[in-house]
Structures are given as structure tokens and as C-alpha cells.
Image (cartoon, helix red, strand yellow):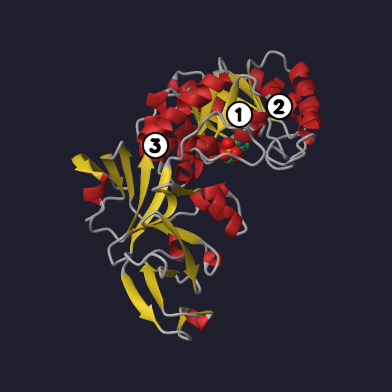
């Protein structure tokens, strides 16, 4: 992603002539790191910045999180780890997902910690590490009941014992992942924990243990272990059923009204004319659509903030634009800012609220936001970087 460093520009000036943009509040992200670290105490904060940091842009956000005190980083693809190194991240980077033996050489070169799920991968890493004259850490994932990535307990113990014998390889971490972390009833975590404890009992020599995502870390202190893998909470959004340590939302999505038009009673809007005016109405055009990751299901369901007031979305969501009813905000005019996610005056729309209306989850709403919308990284309104660059 190309990016531009901007000096001495304010958010309001930088967005004067923008159809739509995303604001990433780096001061809020840093405050969230501090709040989470205060909750975690001596437990490492492992910042999960997979999927381009949930849409916020890992190249700028990850170094800011590191500066704010994140102890380690985690991604899912090896290539994401490489990108983090390119962005200047120096702390340990753990690859949570699958890697091929062919990934060993670039992974060693980038100083990545892979999750090792086969002897073949371990041997490749050992060879690459020996050639490079370094010792490389690996983590082992135990499948304790999610039945996603990882090894069942017997295979994990066998592989750990084999990997331990390989030169220049250090089996550093033992890990698992919870299935019901943010469900109202997360009691299955206790069953998974029992399996994990059994693995840890059989592999007492593996020093670093981690099992928790945001929800588990906030709800179950006994599952924090050496480090908590925190993704969503860094963005100031909370998983369901989780107590918050006072987090601040990081991401805002805004757009400028491209047109305000008058409708007579009976006239309809957008494809299929699924919404029709029941009174003389004023309709505003917002230049964001489902191609930007703004869910099509929000058409006729969502609201946006204009001049601090909630305005209902009307008609079907289009690929690049949608409509809102601004009849009750008489001052609304072309060029006004519409807030799709974020604060405007006394009101705020969270990704969690949007997710509820779009029949999905906040992770999905954030991670779906597409690259067409420029990200402006700021502290207290002073822009520090823009990616991808705007013209
Ligand atoms: C994505 C992910 C996390 C982070 O989850 P959040 O709910 O966003 O905190 C943690 N661990 C694993 C294995 C993941 O894939």
C-alpha cells in the first residue's frame, strides 16, 4: 500500500474535498494499549493485526501499537508477518495460521515465529535457521475442541518431542483457541482448558502459553497465561458479553453528501424503488456503497449521523452510493459530513451497532472496509499519514 506522510495538515482540511474517508485515531489506539496492559498486568499484550489490522491498515497502526507498548504481534499468514517487518515492526511476530515448508527461509529471514504443525515444517525451519546461524522459535497449537487449526493432544506431544531434538529450533510456545469466547454461555472454555492443562502437563518444558482472544482475556483471567492475543479490543470495540477496561473507538467512517434532492409524496428512490416518500421529503446521497464493504443489507435499515442527528437510510444500497432521508434535518446540504461509524455531536454509531443491523459481527464490519476509502491516521486531529495516498 502506498502511503503519504503528511505534516502540518488537519483532518478537516485534508478531507475538504474527499467523497469518503476513514479516520484512524492513533491516540485512541495508544490509549487502548495502555488500558489493556493495565488490565493484563504482567501478561503480554499480543496485538493481533491480521487482515490488515481489521481494515485499519497494519502498516501504520502496528508501529503505533508497538510504540504504545504492545509486547508482541500476531498475524495469520506468513506473508502478513513479512509486511509487518517491512513496516518497521521489531517485536516478535507470531504467525497463527498455516505455513508451508517452503515458507521457512523467508520466515527466518523476516524473523517470524511460525506455528509449526508438521515435522516437515520443523525440519525446514531448522535447516533455514542453521544456515542463517540463528535459533528460531516455534509455537505449537493444540486443538482443544474448536476443531479448526492445530493438532490433537497426542500428536502435539509427539511433534513437540521431535521438534525439541532439531538443531537451531526452540519450541517456545504452546497455544490453543476458544470456541465460545463471546457467547453468553462460555462454559465450554473450562472443558477446553482441561485439555490444554493436560497438554501443558505433558509438555512442561514449553515456556510460553497463550489461549485468549479479546473476549477470553477480558472474561477469564485464568486463561490469560503468558500472553493474550488481542485484536478487536485494540480498536475500542468490545466483543459481546465482555467487560470493557474503558476503551476508545479508533475508527470512524465518514463521507460528504454528494447531492440533496426534493421528493414529492409517492416518489421512490434507488433500485427497485423500494422506499417511497410519504410526505414532501429531502433525500441526501452518500457516496459509499457495498463495494466499499458497507453492507448491502443496511439499505432501508441503517442510520447515519448528519449534523449530530440520526438520519435513516432509505432505498437499496448501491455499489458506490446510498440515500438517506434528511427531511428532519432542514439545514442538511451538499458537502455536509455524514458519519457512518463514529461520533458526531452527542451521538455515536459503533461497528457493533452496524453489525447488528447488517446481521453480522463487528469484526466483519471493520475487516470488510475496502482499500478505495483512504485511511487518515491522526492524533487529536493532526494528520500523520494517509494510506493509500490521495491525489
Ligand atoms: C483473530 C484471532 C485472535 C484475535 O481475536 P479478537 O477476538 O479480535 O481479539 C486471537 N487468536 C486467534 C487464533 C485469532 O485467529
Label 3 element class: helix
Quick check: marks 1 and 2 in contact, CB under 8 Å? yes
Q: Identify the residue position indicated by label 1 in the image.
A: 122
Which of the 4 quarters of the picture holds residue 10?
top left
**Residue 276, image x, y percentages:** 50, 81
Task: Please provide percent x and percent y for residue 350.
Answer: 50, 48
Dot 2: few (<14), some (14–19), or many (≥20) neighbours within 10 Å?
A: some
Mark 1 and mark 2 lie on one chain; the one further toward the N terminus is 1
Say whether residue 183 is left or right of residue 238. right
- Front-most of residues 79 and 257: 257
Tell me if 11 is positioned left or right of 209 in this view: left
Task: Determine if the C-beta at disc 2 is less than 8 A from ligand 1.
Answer: no
**Residue under the point 51% across and 18% down:** 135
At 56% from the left and 48% from the top, the residue drawn is: 352
**Which of the 4 image quadrants contains residue 27?**
top left
Q: Is mark 1 on a helix, strand or loop?
A: helix
Closer to the camera: disc 3 or disc 2? 3
Crowdedness near tag 1: few (<14), some (14–19) or many (≥20) residues, C-alpha within 10 Å? many
Q: Is residue 6 among what the camera can see?
A: yes
Real-space CA distance between mark 1 and mark 3, rounded to the nearest whole angstrom: 31 Å
Q: In this view, does 288 lie to the left or right of 154?
A: left
Q: Mark 2 points at which residue?
A: 159
Q: In this view, does 341 lie above or below 99?
A: below
Judging depth in this view, the residue of 47 and 93 nearest the camera is 47
**Which disc is residue 61 wearing?**
3
Q: In this orientation, does residue 124 appear?
A: no
Amino acid at each position: 500500500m502506498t502511503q503519504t506522510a503528511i505534516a502540518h495538515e488537519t483532518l478537516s482540511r485534508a478531507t475538504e474535498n474527499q467523497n469518503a474517508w476513514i479516520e484512524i485515531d492513533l491516540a485512541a489506539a495508544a490509549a487502548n494499549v495502555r488500558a489493556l496492559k493495565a488490565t493484563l498486568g504482567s501478561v503480554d499484550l499480543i496485538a493481533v493485526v491480521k487482515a490488515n489490522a481489521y481494515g485499519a491498515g497494519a502498516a501504520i497502526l502496528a508501529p503505533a501499537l508497538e510504540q504504545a507498548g504492545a509486547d508482541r504481534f500476531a498475524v495469520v499468514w506468513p506473508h502478513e508477518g513479512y509486511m509487518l517487518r517491512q513496516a518497521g515492526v521489531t517485536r516478535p511476530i507470531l504467525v497463527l495460521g498455516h505455513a508451508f515448508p517452503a515458507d521457512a527461509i523467508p520466515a527466518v529471514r523476516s524473523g517470524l515465529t511460525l506455528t509449526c504443525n508438521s515435522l516437515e515444517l520443523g525440519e525446514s525451519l531448522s535447516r533455514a535457521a542453521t544456515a542463517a546461524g540463528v535459533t528460531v522459535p516455534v509455537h505449537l497449537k493444540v486443538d482443544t475442541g474448536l476443531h479448526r487449526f492445530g493438532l490433537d493432544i497426542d500428536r502435539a506431544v509427539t511433534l513437540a518431542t521431535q521438534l525439541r531434538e532439531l538443531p537451531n529450533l526452540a519450541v517456545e510456545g504452546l497455544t490453543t483457541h476458544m470456541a465460545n469466547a463471546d457467547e453468553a454461555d462460555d462454559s465450554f472454555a473450562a472443558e477446553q482448558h482441561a485439555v490444554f492443562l493436560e497438554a501443558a502437563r505433558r509438555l512442561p518444558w514449553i515456556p510460553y502459553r497463550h489461549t485468549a482472544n479479546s473476549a477470553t482475556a477480558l472474561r477469564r483471567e485464568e486463561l490469560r497465561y503468558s500472553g493474550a492475543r488481542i485484536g478487536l479490543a485494540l480498536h475500542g470495540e468490545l466483543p459481546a458479553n465482555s467487560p470493557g477496561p474503558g476503551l476508545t473507538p479508533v475508527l470512524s467512517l465518514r463521507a460528504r453528501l454528494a447531492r440533496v434532492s426534493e421528493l414529492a409524496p409517492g416518489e421512490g428512490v434507488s433500485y427497485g424503488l423500494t422506499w417511497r416518500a410519504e410526505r414532501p421529503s429531502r433525500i441526501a446521497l452518500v457516496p459509499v456503497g457495498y463495494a466499499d464493504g458497507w453492507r448491502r443489507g443496511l439499505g432501508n435499515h441503517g442510520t447515519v449521523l448528519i449534523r449530530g442527528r440520526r438520519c435513516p437510510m432509505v432505498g437499496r444500497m448501491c455499489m458506490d452510493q446510498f440515500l438517506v432521508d434528511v427531511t428532519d434535518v432542514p439545514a442538511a446540504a451538499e458537502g455536509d459530513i455524514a458519519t457512518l461509524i463514529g461520533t458526531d455531536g452527542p451521538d455515536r454509531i459503533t461497528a457493533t451497532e452496524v453489525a447488528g443491523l447488517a446481521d453480522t459481527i463487528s469484526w466483519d464490519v471493520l475487516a470488510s472496509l475496502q482499500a478505495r476509502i483512504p485511511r487518515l491516521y491522526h492524533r487529536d486531529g493532526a494528520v500523520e499519514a494517509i494510506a493509500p495516498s490521495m491525489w
